[in-house]
Amino acid sequence: MTATQNPPPPPATSTAAARTVDACKVYGAGDTLVNALDHVTVEFERGRFTAIMGPSGSGKSTLMHCVAGLDTLTSGQIFIGDTDLSSLNERQLTRLRRDTIGFVFQSFNLVPTLTAAENITLPMDLAGTAPDAAWIDTIVSTVNLGDRLKHRPSELSGGQQQRVAVARALASRPSIVFADEPTGNLDSRSGGEILQFMRTAVDRFQQSIVMVTHDPVAASYADRVVFLADGRIVDEILQPTAEAVLERQLRFGN
Amino acid sequence: MLKVTLRGLLAHKVRLIATAVAVVLGVAFMAGTQVLTSSISASFDKVFSDVYASIDVVVRSTNEIETPFGSQRTRISDSVLPAVEAVPGVDAAEGQVVGQIRVLGRDNKPLVRTQGPPNFALNWLTEPALNGWTIVEGAPPAGPDQIVLDVKTSKDGDFAIGDTVSVAVSTGVNTYRLVGIARFGRLDTWGGAPAALFDTTTAQALVGEPGTYNWVSIAGDDGISQTELTDRVAAAIPADTEAITGKDFTAESQDAFQKIIGIFNTFLLVFALIALFVGSFIIYNTFSIIVAQRTRELALLRALGASRRQVLGSVMLEAFTVGVIASAVGVGLGVLLAIGLNALMQSIGFSGPDTPIVVPASAVISSVLVGTLITLASAVLPARRAATIAPMAAMRDVATESRGLSRRRIIGGAVLLVGGAASLWFGLFGNSDSGLQLVGLGAFLVFMGFTVIGPVIAPPMARALGAPLARFGGVSGRIARENAMRNPRRTATTASALMIGVGLVGFIAVTAQSLKVSTVEAINTSVTAQYVVNTDGFGSTALPISLVGQITALPEVSTAAGISATFANIEGDARVIIATQPAAFEKVVAITDVEGSFAGLDTNGIAIPKTMAKDKKLAVGDSLAVNFLHGGPSSLVIESIYDTKFPIQGPGYFISDELFAQVTPPDQQTVQSIYIDLTDTSAAGVAEARVPLDAVTSAVPGAELQSLKEFTKAQTDQANQFLVIVYVLLALALVIAIVGVINTLLLSVYERTRELGLLRAVGMSRRQVRSSIRTESVIISLIGTLIGLGIGLVFGWALVKALYDQGITSFAVPWVQLIVIVALAALAGIGAALYPAWRASRLDVLQAISSE
């Protein structure tokens, strides 16, 4: 972002939307010490859809939270684009989340007192910048929400709420979107729709997306699946199918 | 179930803090008031029993008048003494002379302030059995130029034996030689009040009349009871005198004092109850929110087989426990408060000599009872709501309060408002004996009505108030407004607590402003004098009558008229009567003759105001039965019915100064104020006259020369002082209301943890979070303040209309003051949000978004 970054980024980073270098996250101490992330080095390419999978406690959520600037590492580095997150203070991290990152959570994605439209433009409103009306229209029509914009979250179905959440995540043209089990609370049809929208965003708008999931079907929408176990990257699949992912999961025993 | 309750209590003890604080503060106020007044009262009981300890029987006149300063009696002649002394069993009998003077310091200013205890003049009793004083230094007073001071006065004035001491009395300033310093029992004063002692003849000349006593004190022989001796004395004294036991005499003085303390006590208790009333809103809100947040837990209990009664009991038990503990803490705090205030009062000289703190059981019991009952009563509705939670609710997901804005709420609120307005109206205009209670009930009903209807009007108010904030405050302003609207009941209850305090402040501000404006207007339209001489003394410590003559004699002065005040029974009731030089008075104050002639008042006549003549259907020529303490006619003819805008103390009876001189003893023949009309009334003439006027008045201790403007200001300043006291007392209710706002915000923040986490995750900065909570708080505060001020305005208007006949003729709104109140409310809102906003901004984002 700025010209005076140090250390200077290695040339290889130019294709990564986000990456980690030797990321470690340790919880507790002594007997109760847990290595949630154990020297993880991974890249999430620009314009691609990456899924993170792994059994419970494998560190996949921790990895996502750290990369998204919601949590901090014990050691190692994380870059969003060329920005080293460890060099940012609380305020800069908040601004980074607001301006360059989009979020979709499993549930409770929306502010209940704001309408769907207000929820979509929330990050821009927080920044005090005017949303790009044409772009918002494009997203809203992509996620099929046209007639629902004036409604409050409580008047929307679960699927519709997640669509609003996806629209919000895309609305500020973030350099990367993080989705944490975005279909975990939905029936398969609504879930499929959400995944399809995310796929479309990658294909049509070259959006970078990182999604944590433990559903092989959901993972099959991604370009690449990264497998985590005990805080380490243990495998990855490119152009995954649901069957291949399931087979790999079974092999790792979860 | 008990176990569940107690676990529940421990689990949300933090949430109950606000409830506890509200109860503790209210109860502390209530208990503190009672402990303080009981202690003062006990201290003065002891003072009186000390002062009168040696007296077995008192002989006094039967002729008395009840005045606001206690009962006054005619003096009795010293001829009663030989008769009393001859009664078998009487060891000693001596006449007591008591009056008020002002001992002057070396700077020629009174040593004792008028707000403090009175400065007494006493005669030195020569009978050792009756004299409680002992000489510490020097000798007893003997001779017309000798004075003895108590230890405290001699210390305060830095007087030594042989010094000259000046004393201001009704006739002017006298000087005496200090011959002795005395102590009363173990005390440095006459039981708290400073005293000067003279020989009997000197004391009579100074504050009484030659040959008379205020009463005769009698000490009996050993072995004879007070009652026995009283009976014997009673048989030997003239018809217009009576004998009572020393015990009864002491009890009378104690009762008289306790009556005053009782009024003070009631006055303070009203504010304590207001504070507790405000507190009840906080308690109600806390329990409502806790019940809402525990819906699933309570539903689970119901599903597992707990009966409704058990759930209800569980919440009530929780309330009971909080109520009792908080009340107990409140009583403790109240006692500490009383100790502190007592020390403060002692340090400024307003109290008895050694005031022990008395904690009456009744104060403890009533405070704990009221505190607990208010907590229980406030928790009843939330508890009932808890009991009606269906077991199915355990399975449901959301646990928020219902938005029941039923028609019933509007109707109920309207009924309360109409009832309150009616009660207020009848209280003010209905000529009912219980007018004050009706007004109080009306206020209570109106406040309750707004509380019931609050959830209906709070959202539109929040929308309107939040509009500019939402517009300029960006998304955090919009979220704040929505949050203030999302739970109307919670917002309304929180605002209501503030509404009560602000409503009362607004009401008092409007009334006071109207009173002020009316007074200024009345003085400006009625007083044609350019200068006024005033004093803070009363009766024998007011201005000498001779001052009127001295001022009139000045070449710059055209007319000067003095006003004196005395008490008399008129048609059986004790009344204030004003005396003046009628013809002169008409030249300094605009008086219109409605019937008869005011200027022509003679020594048989009395003047009454037009309104009284109308109310009592009196006409010129009618006579009124009167009884002056010190003789004079037993009936007076109405010679004048007048009309004036001049604000007169009391009902407005006027008599001439000649009659005044006949019916008051010499020491009471003083003037309260003198109105001066100059020959040259041009601005320059008025300015020049100040010097000679000042020369005459500055020689009189306690006299204050005021231009008409200064006089007007002094009149309104008095009201301001009282206002400040009332505001300070209401401050507690406001503080409790602010605690309520803090509490509601904290509970809301707690409830919205996930939402806040989400907002923070998608990029809301800590500053924006804080600003959002602050804005919400300001909106809630402003809702309460605006409704409160509206109520205050209407109440004030009604009272002013009702008091039209009492001289409040203008309705005036202190806009600046009201705007300041609104600004303060907004500031208080910001202040209340400080901690909740800080908490909200410090939420761990990760924990918040992953919390259930």
Image (cartoon, rainbow, N blue to C red):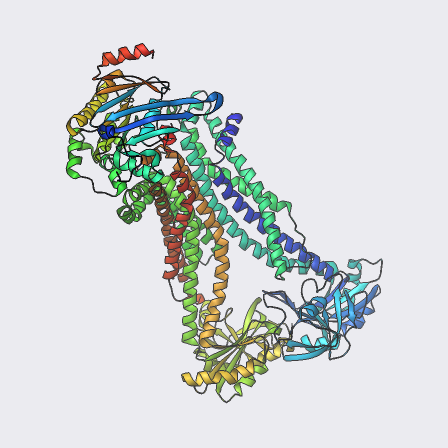
The answer to whether residue B599 is visible is: no
Q: In the depicted view, which residue is nearer to us: A102 or B458? A: A102
Left or right: where does residue B562 sit relative to residue B358? left
The x, y position of residue A119, in whole percent, is: 25, 35
Which residue is drawn at the image coordinates 36% and 33% (left, top)? Answer: B845
Quadrant housing residue B332: top right
Left/right of residue B576 with respect to residue A126 in the rendered view: right
Residue A178 sits above or below residue B18 on the image: above
Q: Quadrant of residue B491?
A: top left
Relative horizontal placement of residue B212, taking residue B537 as reference (left or right): right
Measured from the top left, where is residue A243 in percent x and y? Answer: 23, 11
Q: How many marks?
A: 0
- On screen, residue B765 versus residue B622, left or right, reads left
Tell me where residue B800 appears, x and y as whole percent: 41, 62
Q: Out of B635 and B759, give the one closest to the viewer.
A: B759
Residue B394 seen by the camera: yes
Residue at image coords 50%, 33%: B316
Q: Is residue B475 above or below residue B76?
A: above
Viewer-side residue, B247 vs B538: B538
Q: In percent of the image, x 48 and y 36: which residue is there?
A: B14
Relative height, residue B195 to residue A212 (above, below) = below
Q: Residue furthest bottom?
A: B555
The x and y percentages for residue A9 are 27, 32
Image quadrant holding the C terminus of chain B, namely top left
Q: Nearer the viewer, residue B287 or B452?
A: B287
